[in-house]
Amino acid sequence: MIFVKTEEEIDLMREPCRIVRDCLNFVGERIAAGMTTEEVDKLVYDFIKASGAEPSCLGYCGYPASACVSVNEVVVHGIPDGRTLQEGDIVSVDLCAYKNGFHGDGARTFCVGKVDAESEKLVRVTEECFFKAIESLHEGTPLGDIGYRVQQHAEANGFSVIRSYTGHGIGREMHEDPTVANYGKRGTGVRLKAGTVLCIEPMIAAGGWKVKILDDGWTAVTQDKKRAAHYENTLVIRESGVEILTL
Ligand code: MF3
Ligand code: CO
């Protein structure tokens, strides 16, 4: 069931979403070669706590950290550890904050120093996929149009769309209906109502879309070991467009 939020509820969501936005910017300014992914997680934990919010990911289904820190061929759910970031890596940071009874959720892929041309393009195109998806998104748009637009843009650039992870509704729970696939057919699915709050999060791979989960039960890597990128914002469907809460 898709919950349509009231303006009061949306107002309550602004703060956790702003914290997610600010935390992603804060981390992005500090990411550098030589840092461990655990140090990135510590930045996230401290920032969210200092903002008076809770890191929603910590303990979620047993997840052991505040952020997912996914390097190169890790698509999502990279568990922070002693791995050191190297010049030329790309690193996706995905985090959620809980405050006022609501969650905010966002992700960015950062480049560590100078990266190769394909990685740079992958990061750029993944971000563009998000903006293509929202270009003509408003009340009444069929849900399938989102995935269609992401897929079109990714494949037109020679990349592939990760299938086994999706965007989602968000609110009092971190994951609510509907499931927001990053591939699909135009004109299919429910017509979105104004006041629906969604996380749209393209996960795009430089090679094939198949992933496997490592023995830790979380870390999702591409089967062909090619790199992947991730870009996510929480947004509200409005009468004539969208309002992004994490930008
Ligand atoms: N923030 C992720 C999302 O985009 C969820 C992370 S799973 C967790 O939906 F276990 F790390 F919380
Ligand atoms: Co999400």
Image: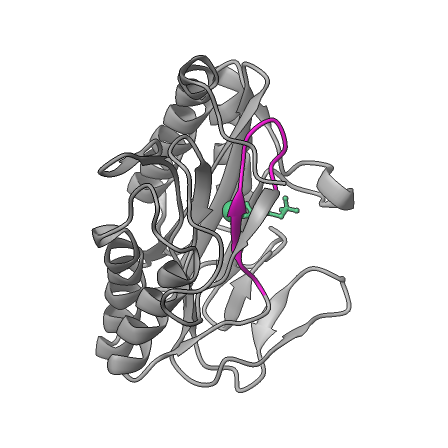
The foreground one among 118 and 159 is 159
In the figure, residue 67 lies in which quadrant? top right
In magenta, the rendered stretch is 165-175
Judge left or right: residue 2 versus residue 8.
right
Judge left or right: residue 139 versus residue 54.
left
Residue at position x 25%, y 54% from top?
A: 131
Residue at position x 53%, y 36% from top?
A: 96
In the figure, residue 117 lies in which quadrant? bottom left
- The verdict on residue 29 being magenta is no
The foreground one among 232 and 95 is 232
Q: Is residue 143 visible?
A: yes
- The verdict on residue 171 being magenta is yes
The foreground one among 176 and 51 is 176
* Percent position of residue 194, x then y: 37, 34
* Percent position of residue 15, x then y: 42, 18
Q: Is residue 110 above or below residue 22?
A: below
Q: Is residue 94 above or below residue 225?
A: above
In the figure, residue 239 lies in which quadrant? top left
- Assign the C terminus to one quadrant of the image: top left
Q: Is residue 115 visible?
A: no
Q: Is residue 225 above or below residue 140?
A: below
Name the main secondary structure of what is drawn in magenta.
Answer: loop
The foreground one among 151 and 31 is 151
Q: Is residue 171 above or below residue 163?
A: above
Number of numbered discs? 0
- Assign the N terminus to one quadrant of the image: top right
* Percent position of residue 158, x then y: 29, 84
Residue at position x 44%, y 64% from top?
A: 188
Judge left or right: residue 182 versus residue 123.
right
* Percent position of residue 93, x then y: 46, 49
